[in-house]
Amino acid sequence: MVICTPPRLPSPRRRLARGFALIDVIVGGILLAVGLAAILSLGARSLSLHQRGEREVIAASLIDDLLGTVLSDGPKDFPDLHEMRGTCEAPYEDFEFLVEIDEGSSGVPYKVAVTVQHIATGDTWTVETLIAAKLGEEPDPDRMPVEPIDREQRYSDQEEAERNG
């Protein structure tokens, strides 16, 4: 003889515990989604800032190179020797440059402004400075040392001086 017992209904306390567990899972999922969205947003922002920083470093280097060329060739001769505007050479084809030189009067330096622009983003960097005209008769003086520098001898002399004291 088989005795069948009616199925037991869960107690109200158990039903309430199951409801809280479901709410806990839903709240945990929402918190996890918000956290992941924040992390992905921060990752994208950091990548953007990194790329911007790279562009700024390259622009600063290009400006420094252009100003160094103006300084070494002299602000008076620079326009005859180099282009005043254009696209930078490889691997910096993404940048354009503009050099503006306002001639100074007797005893007054030239006002030199160099602008570099990133073509794709439109970011622009400008540096203005004053550069004195080159003096002297010789247009481009020879800047070689009178006698060659013996670096190995100089290094060994320094080591010997440090050992002696």
Image: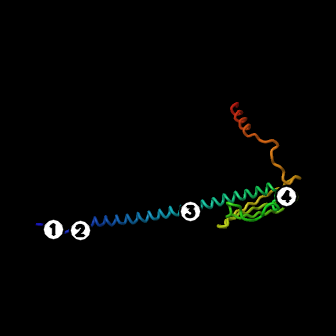
Dot 3 crowding, Cα within 10 Å, few <14, some 14–19, many 20+: few
Residue extending farthest to the left is 1
State left or right for residue 85 relative to residue 20.
right
Establish if 88 lies above or below 157: below
| Contact check, label 1 and label 2, Cβ < 8 Å | no
Give the Cα distance between marks 1 and 2: 15 Å
The amino acid sitting under disc 4 is Val
The amino acid sitting under disc 2 is Leu
For marks 4 and 1, give the one nearer the viewer: 1
Circle 4 sits in a helix, a strand or a loop, which is it? loop
Quickly name the residue at label 4: 108
Image spot of residue 88 (x, y percent): 71, 62
For marks 1 and 2, give the one nearer the viewer: 1
Quickly name the residue at label 2: 9
Circle 2 sits in a helix, a strand or a loop, which is it? loop
Quickly name the residue at label 1: 4
Q: Which mark is residue 45?
A: 3
Sequence-wise, the earlier of marks 2 and 4 is 2
Establish if 3 lies above or below 107: below
Dot 1 crowding, Cα within 10 Å, few <14, some 14–19, many 20+: few
Residue 57, by quadrant, is bottom right
